Image (cartoon, rainbow, N blue to C red):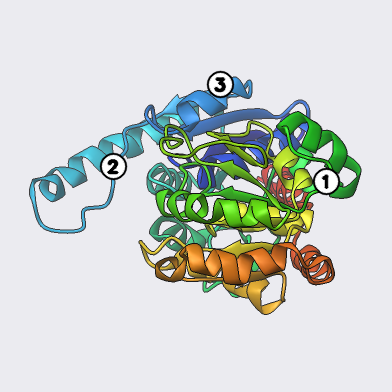
Amino acid sequence: MTRAPRVLLAGGGSAGHVSPLLATAAQIAEQSPEAEILVLGTADGLEADLVPAAGLELATIEKVPFPRRPNGAALRFPGRFSGTLRRVRALMEERGTDVVVGFGGYVCPPAYLAAARSRVPLVVHEANRRPGLANRLGARRAAAVLTAFPGSTLPGARRIGMPMREGIAHLDRAAHRAGARERLGLDLERPSLLVTGGSLGAQRLNEQVSAAAQDVLDAGGQILHVTGKGKTAGLQERPGYRVLEYVSAMEDAYAAVDLALTRSGAGTVSELTAVGLPSVLVPLPIGNGEQALNGEDVVAACGALMVPDAQLDAAYLREQVLPLLLDRDRLSTMAEAARRFGITDAAEVLAEIVISTARRA
């Protein structure tokens, strides 16, 4: 193929699907500036705002989840799915799509089936250690199956890591530490703990950290508490305890602190290990247990600790997290272990695979 590669990136709904998609799109554009990129998403997911903001074209389709039980939605599913499938095939034919790249989510099943019926090669990236239904289906006929974590059950899977923004993937924490602390209003010397529940926040983390915050301050530490939108109620900011709803540049948060207390979403674990930040992971206890699985390998590599959600309380923070925050030698050892586990070039590698697959089409 001599013309510009035409790429359809499918994914959306949550930050876990949208963020790696955007990072991959940026790398495709850098490696092949002439590439034509179209993003397939929904009108009500995060992609509706984030994709246009990144300067990318977004085509939306109806969100048609697979029915889990026999009901009215199950009866309507075949017709709705068929209509969505026709819409995706028409888009692909109109654009002359050379490759479909799926990151998971509701938009992927029709994209994967459309690729199969149109004989367009498919590349699948799975963010979680335990793959979702869409990617389990897509992997069966994919030209390449890539994963963020080792030990995937997907056939032919190859671990390349999680595509992420360059500002995070290539962050030098030590070099950016002082500037990041100044921007975030933190003391330049005190041991610093980042608390975040990811893009949506985590109420339990917020409550328990608030209860133990004074103990951290009294011991000479400080806290950067990123609560999530609309979740600062009841949290009293004071010297050494910085409370923010969100941080637009998470690389600043990662550079500014010595330890993170977080959920273990795939993106969060991948970013923490890429930048070499020690962490205490608190898996969200819902779904199919994928958050616990996401953190298992870095815990085994000694780059993180893990505590079940039900066991995270103010006493655990005082007795386990605070001593770790104050132990520079242990943090240094954990940081190196996290860094060895992490992968920083996933976006570049995935973009190369996508472009080469398109050119072979």
Q: Nearer the viewer, mark 1 or mark 2?
A: 1
Give the labeled residue for mark 3. 52
Residue 99 in sight in this render: no
Q: Quadrant of the C terminus?
A: top right
Element class at badge 2:
loop
Residue 25 in sight in this render: yes
In terms of depth relative to the viewer, which is nearer, 293 or 222? 222
Q: Nearer the viewer, mark 3 or mark 2?
A: 3
Question: What whole-number distance in Å separates the C-alpha atoms at marks 1 and 2?
Answer: 37 Å
Q: Which one is earlier in the sequence, the residue at label 3 or at label 2?
A: 3
Say whether residue 278 is left or right of residue 243.
right
Is there a contact, CB below 8 Å, between mark 3 and mark 1?
no
Q: Amino acid at mark 3?
A: Pro
Give the labeled residue for mark 2. 64
Residue 166 image offset from top left, x and y in percent: 77, 40
Residue 259 image offset from top left, x and y in percent: 70, 57
Q: Amino acid at mark 2?
A: Val
Residue 59 image offset from top left, x and y in percent: 46, 26
Q: Is residue 28 above or below residue 156?
A: above
Give the labeled residue for mark 1. 170
